[in-house]
Amino acid sequence: MRHTTVVLTGLWLACRLAATAAACAPAGFANAQPQTPPASQAQPAPAGEGPTEVVQNAAQGMLGDLDKDRDAYRRDPAKVGQLVDKYLLPHFDTEASARLVLGAHWRSATPEQRQHFIDAFYHSLLTNYGSALVDFTAERLKIFPTKVDPDATRATVRTEVKRANGDRVAVNYYLHRTPQGWKAWDVVIDGISYVNSYRTDFGEQIEAQGIDAVIKRLEAGEKPGAIGKQTGDKSG
């Protein structure tokens, strides 16, 4: 599995579920409702884990490995990426999420540009926020049971995260059925959808600079949340 795509869920439990949840949320879509993937993507899934179990097992698996030797993960941040690859990436729909973030620009982008954007976006997320995951512990996460109709193709799993200062933040996962099982495509933090927020930020800059320039800024290590706040080098 490509290392550049494993960073997808650095957003999940690194930036979003760690103590920096509110600080990592991009500006622009307070209380926004997440854009929904096209209905054609909702397909019958094989029997297996339900939405709640997908989120719970992924979180518990990752936290279990972290607990074995957190100092080792602090010394070697690359190990965090390996955990994301092992426990989280299989349960996140990268293409559906990126398609919604890019919006109309997804349709005009070439297949190569689409993949480069996915790689650069999530690599930037893990690079900038991945270290927060090392200090995230099980007692700070509460997952609420989700009742899902057997024929349902979409589900929302509600969780609550306790930040370092004691505040509790609502973190909701939006999932849909795929042939490989339930997969998340958006995370809503305290009413803010990361898909909608980044869609606005990236959209403005893509229109001003072009998608290749935005990809280069992400590859250079610029935080995704900062993309919409400055114009950058229009020459790319």
Image (spheres, rainbow, N blue to C red):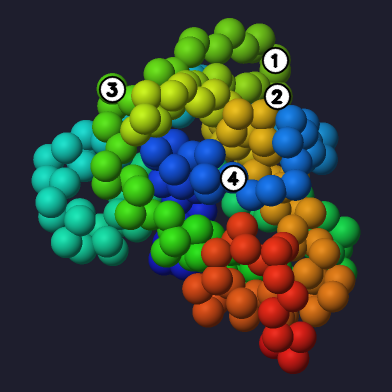
The disc label shown at residue 15, or none: none
Q: CA distance from mark 2 to mark 3?
A: 31 Å
Judge the density around disc 3: few (<14), some (14-19), many (≥20) Cα neighbours within 10 Å. few
As shown in the figure, which amino acid type bears the numbered disc 3?
A: Glu
Judge the density around disc 4: few (<14), some (14-19), many (≥20) Cα neighbours within 10 Å. many
**Closer to the N terminus: mark 3 or mark 1?**
3
What residue is disc 1 on?
Answer: 151
Asked if the residue at tag 4 contacts the one at tag 3, i.e. Cβ–Cβ closer than 8 Å, the answer is no
Q: Is residue 211 visible?
A: no
Image quadrant in which you'd find residue 178: top right
Helix, strand or loop under label 4: loop
**Closer to the N terminus: mark 2 or mark 4?**
4
**Closer to the N terminus: mark 4 or mark 1?**
4
Asked if the residue at tag 1 contacts the one at tag 4, i.e. Cβ–Cβ closer than 8 Å, the answer is no
Q: Is residue 95 above or below residue 91?
A: below
Quarter holding the N terminus is: bottom left
What residue is disc 3 on?
Answer: 139
Report x, y in % for residue 44: 67, 28
Report x, y in % for residue 236: 70, 87
Report x, y in % for residue 87: 36, 42
Report x, y in % for residue 23: 52, 45
The disc label shown at residue 153, or none: 2
What residue is disc 4 on?
Answer: 25
Q: Residue at x 60, y 52 (%)?
A: 94
As shown in the figure, which amino acid type bears the numbered disc 1?
A: Asp
Q: Is residue 132 above or below residue 64?
A: below
